[in-house]
Image (cartoon, rainbow, N blue to C red):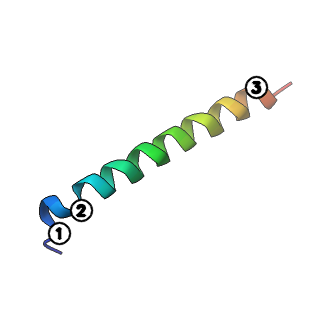
Amino acid sequence: MDCGAYSVPTMDLAYQVATSGILIGVIILFLGKP
């Protein structure tokens, strides 16, 4: 598993997408509560 710096941009992008998705999900979850 010696990906090195080649997979850094892809992993960074995926991490950002996952983080924003989780944040949006949490916000929707809180706003959806009565």
Q: Which residue: 18% across, 63% down? A: 6
Q: Where's residue 14, x and y in %?
A: 41, 53
Q: Quadrant of residue 28?
A: top right
Q: Quadrant of residue 24?
A: top right
For residue 20, side relative to residue 11 (left or right) = right
Q: Quadrant of residue 4?
A: bottom left
Q: Which residue: 51% across, 38% down? A: 20
Helix, strand or loop status at disc 2: loop
Helix, strand or loop status at disc 1: loop
Q: Where's residue 27, x and y in %?
A: 65, 29
User: Can you identify the residue that label 1 sits on?
Assistant: 3
Q: Taking 4 as reference, is 28 above or below it?
A: above
Q: Which residue: 18% across, 75% down? A: 1
Total tally of numbered discs in the picture: 3
Q: Which residue: 27% across, 53% down? A: 9
User: Can you identify the residue that label 2 sits on?
Assistant: 7
Give how far apart the Cα atoms at labels 3 and 1 are.
40 Å
Helix, strand or loop status at disc 3: helix
Q: Where's residue 29, x and y in %?
A: 72, 34
Give how far apart the Cα atoms at labels 2 and 3 are.
36 Å
Pointer 3 or 1: first along the chain = 1
Report the front residue among 21 and 5.
5
For this orientation, the residue located farthest to the bottom is 1
Query: Residue 18 shows which numbered tag?
Result: none
Q: Badge 1: how crowded within 10 Å, few (<14), some, or many (20+)?
A: few
The reply to whether callout 1 and callout 2 are in contact (CB within 8 Å) is yes
Report the front residue among 33 and 23.
23
User: Can you identify the residue that label 3 sits on?
Assistant: 31
What amino acid type is highlighted by mark number 2?
Ser
Pointer 2 or 3: first along the chain = 2
